[in-house]
Amino acid sequence: MAEQIQNLKERIDASETRVAKVVAPATTNLYDTLFGGTLLAWMDEVAFIAATRFGRCPFVTVSLDRIDFNHPIPAGTIVELVARVETVGRTSLKVRIDVFVEHMLKADRLKAVTGSVTMVAIDENKKPTPIR
């Protein structure tokens, strides 16, 4: 049992995914901050990568769960999305995503958004399948 827990922890650690993006004018809204829909797409993508690294099987998004926009993300900043598998079930898992914003010319960094995405493993018929 302890070996299974250690293996699970190692798989979770190995699946952590970090992606950095630049907030360019094409991704901003009328207020010159990152468009929320763009950020949700980025979060979904990084969650998919983390889930795939964990399970090494096809995954699809089941739900975007509680997304908290705590700080605006202005144009001209760097965004880092950090995805980590949080819980694992039989056919699904939950990935937590923390989104950090930093100014390009300063060393400050702020957690701007948090959320989680539930992903389900699917088989060749696109039906839920156990995570290996």
Image: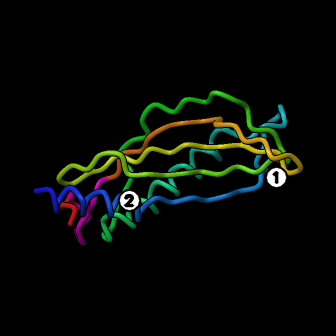
Q: Position of residue 75 (x, y in %)?
A: 83, 44
Provide the residue designation for mark 2.
51
Q: Quadrant of the N terminus?
A: bottom left
**Which region of the structure is painted magenta?**
120-128
Residue 24 circle label: 1
In the orientation shown, which residue stands out farthest toward the right? 105
Give the mark count.
Answer: 2
Residue sticking out furthest to the front: 2
Residue 48 on the magenta segment: no
Asked if residue 34 is positioned above or below residue 131 in the image, the reply reads: above
| Residue type at tag 2 | Ala
Q: Count neighbours of disc 1 (C-alpha within 10 A) and say few if under 14, some if 14 to 19, many if 20 or more.
A: some
Q: Residues within 10 Å of mark 2 (few under 14, many from 20)?
A: many
Q: Earlier in the sequence, mark 2 or mark 1?
A: 1
**SS at mark 1?**
loop
Query: Where residue 28 appears, x then y in whole percent?
Result: 78, 43
Left or right of 6? Residue 35 is: right
Name the residue at 16% across, 62% down.
3
Q: Quadrant of residue 33?
A: top right
Q: Which circle marks residue 79 in the picture?
A: none
Numbered disc 2: secondary structure: helix
